[in-house]
Amino acid sequence: MTDTPGTGLMRGLFLCTHNSSRSQMAEGPLLVRGGMDYQAFSAGTHPRAIHPLAAKAMAELDIDISERAGHRAKGIEEDVFLARENDVTPYDQAHNASILLGLCKANRIKSAI
């Protein structure tokens, strides 16, 4: 993730296929522990409900990513995700879709999580 020009704020998008596990588990800790210096987002190319086992695993770290806490699976077509400076794509299908949609113009990190 890099500095957002003029703000000092680090922003990033964690992009996955369903936005039900991996990307939610990456976004959650940054939202909870990143403080005011970070802004994290997550989305999926084909969003589904947050997986209960992902929520349970994060709860063990005292991080609540459940729908009960207001989290939800989001699609990459939502306006908030357009023109992000950075993204992390933990799955090839999501990585390829983000390129086709022209998301994340500056930095792209492809991960094998």
Image (cartoon, rainbow, N blue to C red):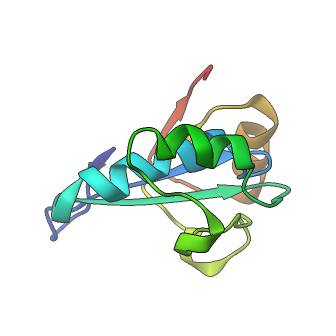
Q: Can the viewer see residue 98 in this picture?
A: yes
Q: Please state the horizontal and vertical placement of residue 74, each as a whole percent of the image.
A: 70, 67
In the rendered image, the residue lying farthest to the bottom is 79
Position of the N terminus, as image quadrant, is top left
Q: Can the viewer see residue 82 in this picture?
A: no
Q: 111 or 24: nearer the eye?
A: 24
Q: Is residue 87 left or right of residue 19?
A: left
Q: Is residue 41 left or right of residue 49?
A: left
Q: Residue at x 71, y 52 (%)?
A: 19
Q: So how many labels did they put on this image?
A: 0
Q: Residue 54 is drawn in which quadrant?
A: top right
Position of the C terminus, as image quadrant, is top right
Up-down: is 47 above or below 2? below
Up-down: is 75 above or below 22? below
Q: Is residue 94 left or right of residue 54?
A: right
Q: Please state the horizontal and vertical placement of residue 73, each as a whole percent of the image.
A: 71, 64
Q: Residue at x 72, y 31 (%)?
A: 91
Q: Residue at x 74, y 71 (%)?
A: 77
Q: Is residue 1 left or right of residue 70?
A: left
Up-down: is 15 above or below 35? above
Q: Please state the horizontal and vertical placement of residue 41, each as a whole percent of the image.
A: 49, 60
Q: Residue 104 is drawn in which quadrant?
A: bottom right
Q: Please state the horizontal and vertical placement of residue 51, each as a whole percent of the image.
A: 75, 49
